[in-house]
């Protein structure tokens, strides 16, 4: 495992995933992780006062423009003892089914949106990949939420 620890943001991620950082030091930017299988996880950082629901709705709107036949539903997920709200989206791309999730939250000095996407064929395990991509996304998100000071309520 590798650890990202800069700008007051910390999380762990698999060693074979590629990290790309975009202007985080300005307090407004993103950190992207890409898996070797083409899945990705993105943390979007916005200034304090940004509405987390608006960030999730903006991601949904962008995806709906790209994938007109996309199905979606409002969701809540409890990760690291913190309940986040957003959307789960299901759509076709290159004749394959795909799932994307956006979850958003406000912290005391910033607002975050977490977006992940993978082809549904990536939720199958193998000897080379013992965990599904969505399990890895949840683990990365868990470590991030602990890193910004959210303590588990359990």
Image: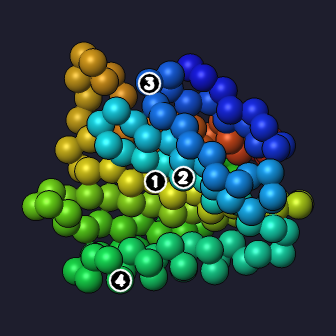
- Residue marked by disc 4: 65
Res 78 visible: no
Question: Residue 149 at what x, y percent from top left?
Answer: 83, 43
**Which numbered disc flags the more N-terminal residue, 3 or 1?**
3
Q: Residue at x 76, y 75 (%)?
A: 50
Q: Do residues under tags 1 and 2 come within 8 Å of each other at their CB atoms? A: yes
**Most foreground residue, 109 or 25:** 25
- Residue marked by disc 2: 42
**Which numbered disc flags the more N-terminal residue, 4 or 2?**
2
Q: Residues within 10 Å of mark 4 (few under 14, many from 20)?
A: few
Q: Secondary structure at mark 3?
A: loop
- Work out which quarter of the rendered image holds the N terminus and state it: top right
- Residue marked by disc 3: 16
Question: Residue 44 at what x, y percent from top left?
Answer: 63, 59
Quarter holding residue 134: top left
Left or right, residue 114 beside residue 3: left
Question: Residue 150 at what x, y percent from top left?
Answer: 79, 46
Q: Residue at x 88, y 61 (%)?
A: 109
**Which numbered disc flags the more N-terminal residue, 4 or 3?**
3
- The residues tagged by marks 1 and 4 sit, at their Cα atoms, a distance apart of 17 Å
Q: Do residues under tags 3 and 1 come within 8 Å of each other at their CB atoms? A: no
- The residues tagged by marks 1 and 2 sit, at their Cα atoms, a distance apart of 6 Å
Q: Secondary structure at mark 4?
A: helix
């Amino acid at each position: 495992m590798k650890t990202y620890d800069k700008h007051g943001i910390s999380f762990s991620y698999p060693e074979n995933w590629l990290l790309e950082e975009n202007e985080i030091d300005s307090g407004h930017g993103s950190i992207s992780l890409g898996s070797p299988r083409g899945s990705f996880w993105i943390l979007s950082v916005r200034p304090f006062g940004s509405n987390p629901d608006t960030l999730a709705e903006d991601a949904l709107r962008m995806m709906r423009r790209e994938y007109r036949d996309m199905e979606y539903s409002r969701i809540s997920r409890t990760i690291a003892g913190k309940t986040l709200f957003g959307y789960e989206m299901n759509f076709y791309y290159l004749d394959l089914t795909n799932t994307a999730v956006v979850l958003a939250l406000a912290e005391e000095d910033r607002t975050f949106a977490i977006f992940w996407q993978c082809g549904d064929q990536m939720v199958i395990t193998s000897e080379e990949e013992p965990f599904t991509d969505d399990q890895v996304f949840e683990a990365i998100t868990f470590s991030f939420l602990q890193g910004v000071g959210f303590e588990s309520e359990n």
